[in-house]
Amino acid sequence: MVKFFKIHKYSGLVAGVVLLLLGFTGFFLDHKGWSFLYDVTFSNVPKAALEKEKVLFESYYVNPGNDNHIITAGRRGAFESFDKGNSFTKTSNLQFFAIREYNGLLFGATNEGIYSKYVHMQEWKPFLLKNMIINSMNIYKNFLVASIDKKDIVLIDIKNRSIVNEGNAFIDSSYLNQDITLSRFVRDLHYGRGLFDGIASLLINDYGAIMLTLLPISGFLIWFLIKNIKNRSTSYTKNTRKIIKLHSNFFSIIAIVPLLILIITGIFLDHAMDLRNFMSSIKIPSTFLPPVYNSLKEDIWSVDYDGKSFRVGNRYGVYKSKNLYDWEIDSKGFAYRMIRKDERLYISGMGAPNRILQEGKYTMLKHSPHMFRDVFTLKGETSFISPHMMRFPLPKFQEATLYSVLLTMHDGTFFAPWWIWINDIASVLLVVLFITGFYRWKKRKRSLKVSA
């Protein structure tokens, strides 16, 4: 018992601060839709945090009639330049997920509905679906199709400013019976979307993150109080026992499951580049996958309409429907983004090949960056923006958003490139804390039964 106590104590003292940091930052990163994460900014931050700002951009538009005029937008808002990107002016504080053009009118999919503006004007104005999160959007002729918070689909007549059809993506499970790679499964689990539909997976992650924050705090407090317990009052001793009970109880024990998921998947993601081939080669059979993979009803990452058929992109691929009720697989492979340019549909893959749908046929999209987020034309050539390739002019920031600071603290790049090994050591010590903590909790329960 004494040895287990010492192992538990020293493991906690060594790893506690890192675990606290991982739990605290992880909780907020699970909720990256919260606006204040992009409104609060910090100066004098490491270069790694400023570099992450580029990842926040989702859309890029170059005026076909004037390539000096650039509009780019993302989580941090919308920005406009009239000098080929040498300087940008912020035109909106909304979070933008897409910008699409229709006859000189621009539409923006935002966290507060669909907004619009004329190309030559700067002010974005509400258009439709006010206060709704529009995570994906495309335009075909007079119709705009949008996905609301990855759950619902609406088809809008732009001229009449009205909804002409709406539905969802309840796909029959027979079309979802697919194996996935270990790489995909690890990411889904770690990001809070790998177990159940809706927010259930995210809430489990939140519980793990909260406990990973509270356990080090209470552990440090217990260590401090016990260290200074000599010559203290009876009430001081009672308060210490209360904190011990808060630290070691049923809720702490059941947190072991989500925390194990988070730390194991976190270690894999820390070394994703080195383990890429291994994780991509391992296939997990559909029969062993959690319930969410048999539904994916709230997994609309991208949406499209071509005048006849609707399409949604989810982590399995592109699914097609003529009536928003009967869906079938149209193209396999995670459809991260779908961007329509007239009769062509560009499909960006996440851990899957990029594709283009043209004249009813899917073909591989060569010479395009992985996980591209938007497609635009510059000097007659098709160009892409991607979090892995941001070579076009973007606003230059002197401050990093709270989101970027938290993200770099979580993955360790805020401190140093080698910090991932510190995270790994803390994760291994957390397993030691689980084992020793559970043993001490069980022994304490037995002692209480005997004394009773």
Image (spheres, rainbow, N blue to C red):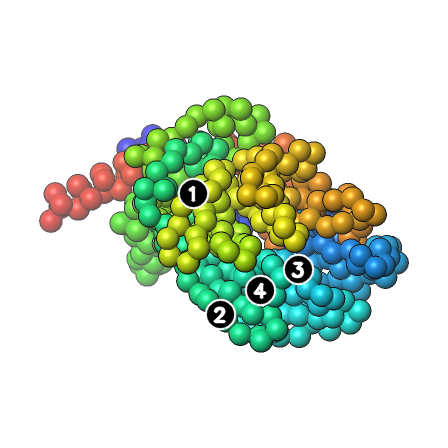
Q: What element carries label 2?
A: strand
Q: What element carries label 4?
A: strand
Quadrant containing the N terminus in the rendered view = top left
Q: Is mark 3 on a helix, strand or loop?
A: strand
In the rendered image, residue 310, in percent from the top left (x then y), is placed at 49, 54
Residue 263: tell me if it is visible: no
The dot on residue 164 is 2
Marks 2/1: CA–CA distance: 24 Å
Is residue 49 toward the left or the right of residue 236 in the image?
right
Marks 3/4: CA–CA distance: 12 Å
- Crowding at label 3, few (<14), some or many (≥20) Cα neighbours within 10 Å? many
Q: Which residue matches tag 1?
A: 329
Q: Which residue matches tag 4?
A: 143
What residue do we see at 35% from left, 31% from top?
Answer: 285
| 184 in relation to 47, above or below | above
Q: Is mark 1 on a helix, strand or loop?
A: strand
Front-most of residues 395 and 59: 59
Marks 3/1: CA–CA distance: 26 Å
- Crowding at label 1, few (<14), some or many (≥20) Cα neighbours within 10 Å? some
Query: Are dots 2 and 4 in contact, CB under 8 Å?
Result: yes
The mark nearer the N terminus, 2 or 1, is 2
Q: Which residue matches tag 3?
A: 100
Is residue 324 toward the left or the right of residue 449 in the image?
right
Q: Which amino acid does label 4 sit on?
A: Phe
The mark nearer the N terminus, 2 or 4, is 4
